[in-house]
Amino acid sequence: MADLSCRLLVIGAGPGGYVCAIRAAQLGVETIVVEAEKPGGTCLNVGCIPSKALIHAADEFHRIASLGDSPLGIVSAQPTINFAKTVEWKDGIVNRLNTGVAELLKKSNARLISGSARFLDGKRVEVNGPGGVQIISAEAIVIATGSKPSELDGMPFGGDVISSTDALALAEVPKRLAVVGGGYIGLEIGTAMAKLGAKVTVIEFGEKILPQYDKDITQPVAKHLQQLGVEVMTRTAAKGHKAGTLLVESADGRKTEIPADKILVAVGRTPRTDRVGLAELSLTLQGPFIEIDDKCQTFMRGVYAIGDVTGDAMLAHRAMAQGEMVAELVAGRSRVWDKRCIPAVCFTDPEIVDYGLSPLSAEQQGIDVVTGQFPFKANGRAMTMENESGFVRVVARADNHLVLGIQAVGAGVSELSAAFALAVEMGARLEDIAGTIHAHPTQSEGLQEACMKALGQALHI
């Protein structure tokens, strides 16, 4: 194969990589993007998209199955699920989006090459693809290779021990599922499987599930897990497994055998850099992650890194924003990473949104704050949808009422995340949100009411 050259080479066509390539090509930068698998990366193929499809299917099945206990007066026969058809539908969505990403790259004149890329030096990459090996030279190179599920010592993936990727490709719902890790990945998949009929046990090494959130936020999730029959074992470690059994040990030394047809290990993610040839570059690492500056530049001139390979927050929307910024930098524009914060959304039941500072994190930074919290049980729209669990909470400076953070837990609150992000990024104050007319009846009124509560002007609580 003939060698190639370009102005920008992007390694990886995940959310960060393909956005970077498209934006660069839009700005007239000759761009090549190399991807070893299907375009879209982890998020599209084996992460965000298929997991949310599975969660939706599980929610619908569970809703219909629970109608007999509903006060709505709707009576329905006991439903069944054709899981193979569910998987086919999920895969169809992924395939449509794969095709869409490839078409977007083509439309923008960014060239997509299939193959595995490995650095020869800071300007040249060797690509091993279906047609053979070729060398691509570039003025600027972006590392956007993403991440992969982390394994536990003594419990490598294979057989009954599965990763989140494997869990989203199961041909049938396991009768008994053990989930090692009480973070958002484990709880999202575990909750969906419980709704589909699996007996789920969650093993968490820490004091509580979802350790990155405070107890007020996680309490509604924990309560709903209990209602679903999910057993949660905290301060407990996975020690090994044998056929049909997970071996665990609690903090007090008590050992237990958990029956499990499948064991989902969801203890974090590791940057996918092992095959890229980083040893050929003079990069600085922070643990396993590539260190970058406020322009996503590594310590080798002309080499950038974006997304999961650079550490927290390992979120698709962060990678996209970084990719767009780097594309504009390569095109000669002046950009710098100046985001106030990055929204985190957890698609548990109920959902969680966390944006900016919590009351505790503000206190730890020595900031004097006021807070306002509004429960959905006082929200008309939430009542009419039988979704009264949870609340919206706002955190603002005590002196000038600048909004520093917004948190929410409740059904569908992920769709409020854009409003939360806009408020913080635009530098809104409590008075700005409280004085904005919010449509009634909607759950978004919870944000307005929380701000009014913080101002001592609560109307509906």
Image (cartoon, helix red, strand yellow):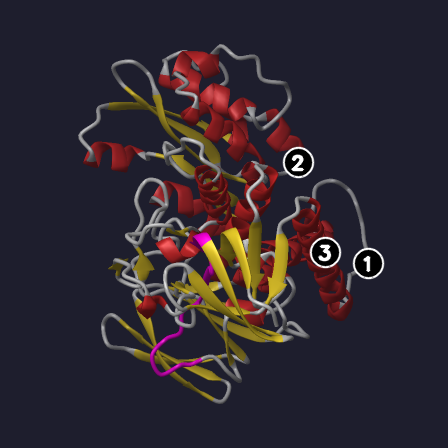
User: Secondary structure beneath disc 3?
Assistant: helix
Q: CA distance from mark 3 to mark 2?
A: 36 Å
Q: Residues within 10 Å of mark 3 (few under 14, many from 20)?
A: few
Horizontal placement of 311 versus 14: left or right?
left
Task: Look at the image and give the residue range highlighted in magenta.
Answer: 139-156
Q: Tell me: residue 434, above or below residue 283.
A: above
Q: Residue at x 33, y 34 (%)?
A: 357
What percent of the width, then of the height, locates residue 322?
A: 44, 43
Q: Residues within 10 Å of mark 2 (few under 14, many from 20)?
A: few
Q: Within the magenta stretch, is there residue 145? A: yes
Do the numbered discs 3 and 2 sit on residues whose CB atoms are within 8 Å? Answer: no
**Residue 199 visible in rendering:** no
Q: In terms of sequence position, does the residue under pointer 3 or pointer 2 come before the other?
A: 3
Circle 3 residue:
99
User: Secondary structure beneath disc 2?
Assistant: loop
Do the numbered discs 1 and 2 sit on residues whose CB atoms are within 8 Å? Answer: no
Circle 2 residue:
385
- The amino acid beneath tag 2 is Met
